[in-house]
Image (spheres, grey):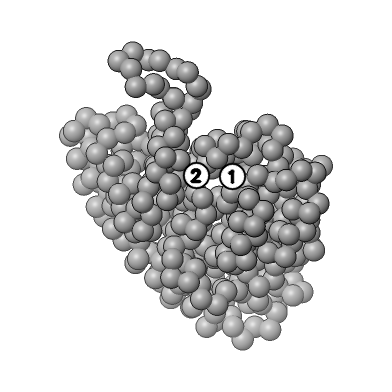
Amino acid sequence: MNKRLFLSPPHMSGREQHYIAQAFESNYIAPLGPFVDRFEAAIRDYTDTPSALATVNATAALHLALRVLGIGAGDVVLASSFTFIGSVAAILYQNAVPFFIDSDHQSWNLDPTLLEEAIAKAPKKPKALILTHLYGQCADLEPIMATCKHHGIVLIEDAAESLGATYKGAHSGTFGDLGVYSFNGNKILSTSGGGMLVGHDKALIDKARFYATQAKEATPHYEHIEYGYNYRLSNILAAIGVAQMEVIEERVAQCRQIFAWYQEELGGTEEITFMPELPQTQGNRWLTTLTFERTDPLHVMHHLESHNIESRPLWKPMHAQPLFKDALHVSRGVSDDLFARGLCLPSGTQMQRDDVSRVCTHLKEALS
């Protein structure tokens, strides 16, 4: 049996154990510590964002974003429908009301024209939009930002999958009121589990830091006026993050190279369409994703699995999930169609050209 090709396995730089050893020697094992500070600084410097807060995961960061932006019970929160549950679960944590918006064909991300329709149909004025940059590809930010500004809606960027992606030269996650990155085990950079909240308003990040640290008041004893959470990142995991950030440009370049190899080998296959990339944007191509015109993607997935190759269907839209069967949504059927026809291919940054060729050989077998 050939070696297992995973969808997106972790790829360590080689410096992680060195930094972890330093953390152990310092005995900063619990959350907080010098490597948390260094990790936050690395993200600030890389994304050119003034403030950053390391968290246990990106969902926690989204929860903090909603909390500090004043989103509470009964508030309407608009959100990308074509995404992972972690993008929107925090809406429920705040007892707010999700309103899902379908994608467009041009980006596979939130449709800017449907955003206006959703605002008009909402039972009351929406307070926030959680915008997902899907599979590392930027949404069409300018019209979305303009609509949010016009209607007084705060914008939270779910850039969990898109660290390293840019829109007109600036990093995804840095356009909204707040942005979120993920360092889960399958992301382009991994700390095993972790997230980051970023923003230009230091007061918002400071308030999120307060809530993330059990909302402890600045007293010698434990004093609590508000409730908070245990959402701070471990110094040990942050040490991994510091080492990972040293190779971020290499990882993005390799993901884009892998995508280019797939395009070269499958581009002439009439039935296949790859996820597009908007003009003046550069995605990180975290995962290579495509759709089939005629073949059931599950057939392709099972055939690849029989050759020890992992693949995965595209995200099932949130408005189609049983959890949200009664949720508000606007749709033109784009994300439903993408889910029905799409597949994610192995895209780990340690893949070589021969690995991509192996995937493509068996994928073509499935199509034939």
Q: Is residue 90 above or below residue 103?
A: above
Please give left or right for residue 282 compared with residue 79 in the image.
left
Residue at 26%, 55% (x, y): give it.
14
Whether residue 158 is visible here, answered yes or no, is no
Whether residue 125 is visible here, answered yes or no, is yes
Q: Callout 1, which amino acid?
A: Gly
User: Pointer 2: what residue?
Assistant: 58
Query: Closer to the camera, 13 or 196?
Result: 196
What x and y, as percent, mark residue 303?
A: 65, 65
Dot 1: element: helix
Please give left or right for residue 112 compared with residue 38 in the image.
right
Query: Closer to the camera, 247 or 293?
Result: 247
Cβ atoms at labels 1 and 2 below 8 Å apart: yes
Q: Residues within 10 Å of mark 2 (few under 14, many from 20)?
A: many
Q: Callout 2, which amino acid?
A: Ala
Please give left or right for residue 105 compared with residue 24 in the image.
right
Residue at 72%, 55% (x, y): give it.
101
User: Pointer 1: what residue?
Assistant: 86
